Each structure stands twice: as C-alpha cells, then as structure tokens.
C-alpha cells in the first residue's frame, strides 16, 4: 500500500517489469486533483474532527498550474469541488470561481470534471451538470455513445491518445443526493439505505463493519443503465486496441476507502467487470481524503488522490500523471507527499485468447 501520509515508502518499481521510468518517453500526460471543497470560509472541521482548509484550494490550483503548464493534455478534477458549508447565496459563485481557476491551470486544455457528494449537496444535479459541461459537449474519439440526455448521467469517455481510452463514471447515479425526492434513482437509493443501514441517520456507519460501512448517504452506486454503458465502453476500447484508465469520485478498492465508508455501493460488481477486461490499467478516485495507491490481486492499479481540503496549507496535494506504452507514473506534489507511484500495465494475453 502506497501511503500519502509519509515520504518513507520507496517507489514501487520491481525489477523485471521491462521498462525504465527514467529513459522512456511518455505518450501523454494529465493533471489530477481531488476534493478541493472550496468555500470562502475560515478553517473548519469535518464530521470526524479533521481540520479543513477551505480557502487553500485556490493557492493549490495555482501551484499545480506551475507543474502542469506545457506538460498536460488535460486536467481531471475528481469531484467535491465545493464544500457543503458554502452559504446558499454563494454556492454558484464558489463553483464558478474554482472552475475558472482550473481552466486557467489547464492552460487551454480541457478540464474533465467529476461530481462528488458535496457538489450534489450544494446544487441539484439538473443545475450542476450543465454548469460543469457534463457530459462534455466535445470529446476526442473514438468514444462511446452517451446514455440518453433524460438520464442526466455524468458518465462519458474520450481518447487522449489513439492507444488509450479514459472512462469517467458517475458514482452518484443511484444516490440520495442531487435527484428530486420523487426520482426513481433517489427512491432506489433510499430503499438500499433502509435495507443496509440500521441507523436513523443514514450518514452514520455505526454498527456497520468493513465494506458494509459503505452504505451511507454520502456514497452511491452505478445503476443498470450506466453499467451497460460501461460494458459498451470497455468493449469499444478493446475493439480499438486501447488501454483504459477509469476515473470516479469514489474508490472501489477497500484498502483505499477509509475502512470502507467511501466505497461505491456496487464496488464488487464493478471490480469483477474491470478484472474481466485486462485493457483496464488503473482506477483513479478521490473521496477518501487520506489517499493512497496499490495494485489488487488481479494487477489492476488503484490510485486514490488525497483531499486538498484536509492537507496542511503548504500548496496541498495534486498530481501529474505520465502515461507510457507499458506503465503510468503518478507524481505527487505538495507538502509531505510520497515518491512517484509506478503502475506497470496488465498483460493483454487474456484479451487476445
């Protein structure tokens, strides 16, 4: 497990991987940042008592700009862009402020936004998605046809390089957040919470253990329509001989999900699907503010970016990800971040048989 709490852990490079991070030339690279939680408010506390530095997101983005400038094909913002403590009258202004800062940091490249629980607590989905251009009006192809507009889903894919597909998931498809109270996705989420969480307060995971702690109001799941779309995207990537990088606000690997409460509700179903497609190289998420990186038993890499909002105000954490033909490298920047995480890709032999 590659932790973001210490600089003592060595770079994860194994001999015999068949590549040299120092000598190879990257095919493309992108910037990544997560859990900005911006609000023009004094520092506060999380539900768990952790200090939150609400104003630090802007200097962090500006520090990221210096590292990303001239090096990145795009920037991915992994969600929770603004914090739920924003006053109602300033929520849109807060969102627009951070959106503009990220666009400036991307230096003309696209910014791919994901939605998080704080975003959907601040603004209804119908208002949030068009504000963030979700799904994007322009995508580099090949790309999978999107679900119908009436589904109001924020999933999409795009190809930053002929050999690679990026797949962005909407982790609050089935959710108690963002939908009108009468919407089928909201009602389905409330039924799941009623069945799996015994607490009156559905934000509480008291009496829940391990991965069962995921059944809380601030997480969600992919619905049947989005799962079908994901299958189509993976098949399309294979047909075009592309590797795949998946992005979602919530992680799907229990060791990187804050003891379970940050996991997608249907993480097991998604893991099984991704394991069945060796073209999938990495799953990059946020939500669990401690962050970390590790490969699972199937060789799929999981990277959870640490939350900017809970890092000490020293130009907090962000990443520059370089993608090579047979591996990717996540380079973290900021105060007390780990050395690069090197992720060799899985063999495609199974897919070719």
Image: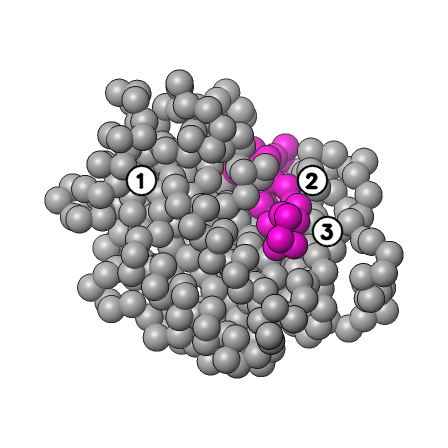
Which residue is at 81% across, 53% downward? Answer: 13
Q: Which span of residues is magenta-colored?
A: 288-313
**Residue 259, x across and y down, in percent:** 53, 30
Residue under circle 2?
A: 1
Q: Nearer the viewer, residue 229 or 170?
A: 229
> Badge 3: few (under 14), some or many (20 or more) residues near its Cα, within 10 Å?
many
Residue under circle 3?
A: 341
Q: CA distance from mark 1 to mark 3?
A: 33 Å
Residue 160 visible from this viewpoint = no
**Residue 266, x across and y down, in percent:** 39, 45
> Badge 1: few (under 14), some or many (20 or more) residues near its Cα, within 10 Å?
some
Which residue sits furthest front?
A: 353
Residue 340 visible from this viewpoint = yes
Q: Nearer the viewer, residue 161 or 42?
A: 161
Residue under circle 1?
A: 121
Q: Is residue 257 left or right of residue 14?
A: left
Tell me the quadrant of the picture where the N terminus can be found.
top right
Tell me the quadrant of the picture where the C terminus can be found.
bottom right
Q: Nearer the viewer, residue 80 or 255?
A: 255
Please say if 239 is above or below 246: below
Q: CA distance from mark 2 to mark 3?
A: 10 Å
The first of marks 2 and 3 along the sequence is 2
Please say if 11 is above or below 198: below
Which residue is at 26% across, 60% downward? Answer: 152
Q: CA distance from mark 2 to mark 1?
A: 32 Å
303 is within the stretch colored magenta: yes
- Closer to viewer: mark 1 or mark 3: 3
**Residue 84, x across and y down, in percent:** 36, 36
Name the element at disc 1. helix
Which residue is at 45% across, 53% downward? Answer: 270
């Amino acid at each position: 497990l590659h932790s973001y709490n210490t600089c003592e852990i060595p770079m994860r490079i194994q001999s015999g991987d068949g590549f040299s991070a120092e000598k190879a030339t990257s095919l493309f690279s992108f910037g990544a940042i997560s859990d900005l939680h911006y609000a023009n408010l004094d520092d506060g506390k999380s539900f768990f008592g952790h200090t939150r530095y609400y104003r630090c997101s802007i200097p962090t983005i500006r520090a990221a700009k210096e590292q990303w400038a001239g090096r990145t094909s795009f920037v991915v913002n992994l969600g929770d862009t603004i914090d739920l403590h924003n006053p109602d009258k300033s929520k849109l202004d807060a969102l627009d402020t951070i959106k503009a800062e990220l666009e400036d940091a991307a230096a003309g490249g696209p910014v791919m936004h994901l939605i998080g629980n704080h975003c959907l607590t601040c603004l209804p989905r119908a208002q949030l998605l068009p504000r963030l251009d979700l799904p994007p009006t322009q995508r580099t192809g090949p790309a999978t046809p999107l679900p119908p507009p009436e589904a109001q889903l924020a999933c999409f894919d795009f190809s930053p390089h002929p050999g690679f597909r990026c797949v962005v998931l909407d982790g609050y498809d089935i959710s108690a957040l963002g939908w009108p109270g009468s919407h089928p996705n909201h009602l389905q989420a409330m039924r799941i919470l009623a069945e799996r969480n015994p607490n009156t307060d559905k934000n509480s995971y008291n009496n829940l253990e391990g991965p069962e702690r995921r059944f809380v109001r601030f997480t969600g799941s992919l619905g049947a329509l989005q799962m079908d779309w994901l299958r189509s995207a993976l098949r399309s990537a294979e047909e075009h001989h592309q590797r795949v990088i998946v992005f979602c606000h919530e992680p799907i690997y229990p060791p990187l999900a804050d003891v379970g409460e940050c996991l997608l509700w249907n993480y097991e179903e998604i893991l099984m699907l991704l394991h069945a497609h060796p073209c999938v190289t990495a799953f990059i998420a946020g939500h669990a503010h401690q962050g970390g990186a590790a490969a699972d038993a199937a060789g799929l890499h999981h990277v959870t970016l640490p939350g900017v909002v809970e890092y000490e105000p020293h130009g907090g954490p962000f990443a520059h990800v370089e993608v090579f033909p047979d591996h990717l490298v996540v380079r973290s920047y900021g105060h007390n971040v780990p050395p690069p995480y090197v992720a060799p890709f899985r063999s495609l032999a199974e897919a070719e048989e």
